[in-house]
Structures are given as C-alpha cells and as structure tokens.
Image (spheres, grey):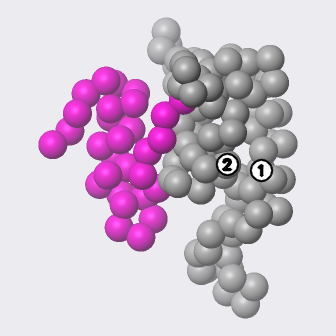
Amino acid sequence: MKVGTDTLPLLWNSFPWHPYKFDNVQSNRAPVTGELQEGRGFLEQLVGMYELDMVVAVGRKAETGLKPYVSESTGKLRIGDSVLRFATVRHPSFGGKGDFVKGMATVTLGISLL
C-alpha cells in the first residue's frame, strides 16, 4: 500500500473480524484456533493483492500465529512468494492504546515516543 511515496505496513490482527461472545456482539474475546487458521488465508490474499514490504502483528496472538513463518536468521516473514519485514506492536485493547501508539511510531517513523 502506498501513500505518496511512502509504503505503509499491513497491520495484522490475527483474525480480520471482531470476535465476540456468543450472546453479546458488543463484547471482546480472543480468537480461537480455528479463527486464527482462517485468518491466515485472508492474510495470504492481502499480501498477494497489494505491494507490501512489511507486516505488523497487532498483539501477541497475531505474533504467535505468524512466528512459524518468520526466519530466525533474518527476522523476515515469508507469505507465499513474498518476503516481508516483520514487527509486533502491543494490541490497543485492555489499556494498551498508549503502547500501541508508541509501537506504531517506532515501526513506521523510526522514532521512539517517551
């Protein structure tokens, strides 16, 4: 994805929809294993559709789901034929907004917010 001359990273949240408790669509819950596996197929499609150079895992679930595809020697993520830069930021839910903003500033701008 390009904005002007800058390439933006794809933010990946392990499951591309809002998982909620069965009886409350306004609730939040962590995605279950089947949902994480389903999400992987959508990630492959997105990487194939757009000119990306980086994927940012939003939260530990996303990071854990992608770790098997990250090279230990280079730290890069392989999705299909694409080899992409990879980073993880704190998920903004449950009080993580500030750390998420700081993490995104570091990833996208290369700066550290105190």
Confirm whether the magenta stretch covers residue 47.
no
Residue 25 pos. (x, y %): 68, 80
Quarter-of-image position of residue 108: top left
Residue picked out by circle 2: 65
Under mark 1, the amino acid is: Gly
The residue positioned 69% from the left and 82% from the top of the image is 21
Q: Find numbered disc 1 in the image and state the secondary structure of the residue it sits on.
A: helix
- The disc, 2 or 1, on the residue closer to the chain's N-terminal end is 1
- Marks 2 and 1 sit apart, C-alpha to C-alpha, by 9 Å
- Mark 1 neighbour class, 10 Å CA radius: few under 14, some 14 to 19, many 20 or more: many
Q: Up-down: is 64 above or below 25?
A: above
- Corner quadrant of residue 47: top right
- Residue 25, compared with residue 69, is above or below; it is below
Residue nearest the viewer, comparing 8 with 79 = 79
**Residue 54 appears in view:** no
In which quadrant is the N terminus drawn?
top right
Residue that label 1 marks: 39
In the rendered structure, the answer to whether residue 53 lies left or right of residue 40 reads left
Give SS at disc 2: helix
Tell me the crowding category of disc 2: few under 14, some 14 to 19, or many 20 or more residues within 10 angstroms, Cα based: some
In-front residue for pair 71/99 = 71
The structure residue drawn at horizontal position 55% and vertical position 20%, both measured from the top left corner, is: 73
Identify the residue at image location x=34%, y=46%. Answer: 101
* Position in image of residue 33 (x %, y %): 76, 63
In the displayed image of the protein, which residue is found farthest to the top? Answer: 5
**Residue 92 colored magenta?**
yes
Residue bounds of the magenta highlight: 86-114
Residue 106 appears left or right of 53 = left
Q: Residue at x 78, y 44 (%)?
A: 40
Residue 32, position as x, y percentages in the image? 73, 68
Asked whether 55 or 78 is in front, the reply is 78
Mark in front: 2 vs 1: 2
